[in-house]
Amino acid sequence: MAALPAKSKLIAAAPAVFVVLWATGFVVARLSAGHVGPLWFLSLRFPIAGAFMLAVALQQRAPWPDAKHSLHAMVAGAFLHGLYLGPIYWAVAQGLPAGVSALIVGLQPLLTAFMAALILGEVIYPRHWLGLLVGLIGIGLVVWPKLIYAHVGGITPLTAACALFGAIAISFGTVYQKRFATGLHLATGGFWQYVGASFVVVLGAVFLGDFQFDYTWQAWSALAWAVLVLSIGAITLLMILIREGEVSRVSGLIYLVPAVAAFCTFVMFDEKLVLVQIIGMAVCAAAVLLVNRPQVQRV
């Protein structure tokens, strides 16, 4: 069998690389906790990401949307980025394990399916209801040890609710984007999304009055990684995957994000997960896989 060209090998590996990079977003939340105010951190990150998108748009001479679609992109960005990451970063800063937050957000495709049914009129199949039941069981397995093991800390009703709110926000933002802001150029649409996201987190930072930035290596490393690796590197890689038609492979691997995030935080921060929680993560992954299984068309 002939060896694959170097470019083909890179494209083949890109989806897995993207998923690993995506998982490190939860590691960044954990690294920055206690060193940078969570919403202030995002207030620094999003405008820089928006400036990058603006530079890409200008370099590519991308078409700009009209005022109506720009507003839709801003609303989508407020949910997809600001109202998604803001509560999660705050919850992690309060002690919620980053791996657990990744697990809860991992149910986003399941939540999106139900919202798409309510808002867009898409069909809910029996597998969606089964997936919801299995997913709830999985979350229960992850949260339950908190009642038994004292060292499994940080999981409180408030922090879990914040992570769930973040998952609901990105789910709604996904449906809103599909309903009102499809067809926009990735760079120009992304720029307006980051404008909307920045508006939300800046308001949140002002409301909380938390502008901490202690200038430690953790603060600078987290910000540098979030901007360079996540907002620039991961987004650029996503652009390449979209161009090459490999996005479906990313969707197939995205279910590994909670496990990757949990492993990274275990290695870096000694965040412990007991066996029943690991089983719960696997159950949640099975629930999302069940919901996203292609529907067989009968002829």
Image (tube, rainbow, N blue to C red):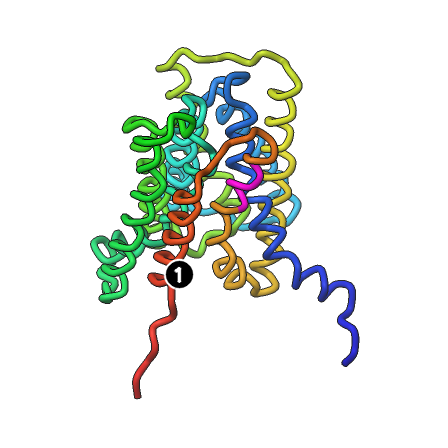
**What x and y, as percent, mark residue 144?**
31, 37
Farthest residue in the bottom direction? 299
Front residue (pair 63, 80): 80
Q: Is residue 141 left or right of residue 133?
A: right
Tally of numbered tags: 1
For this view, does 156 lie left or right of residue 37?
Answer: left
- Classify the position of the N terminus by image quarter: bottom right
Q: Residue at x 38, y 70 (%)?
A: 294
Question: What main secondary structure does the magenta stretch of the protein show?
Answer: helix
**Residue of label 1:** 289
At which x and y percent is residue 267? Answer: 60, 35
**Does any portion of residue 68 appear in the rendered image?**
no
Q: Are there few (<14), some (14-19), or many (20+) residues within 10 Å of tag 1?
A: some
Is 246 placed above or below 110 here?
A: below
* Quadrant of the rendering where the C terminus is positioned: bottom left
Does 13 appear above or below 274?
below
Q: Is residue 64 magenta?
A: no
What is the span of residues highlighted in magenta in the rendered image?
Answer: 260-265
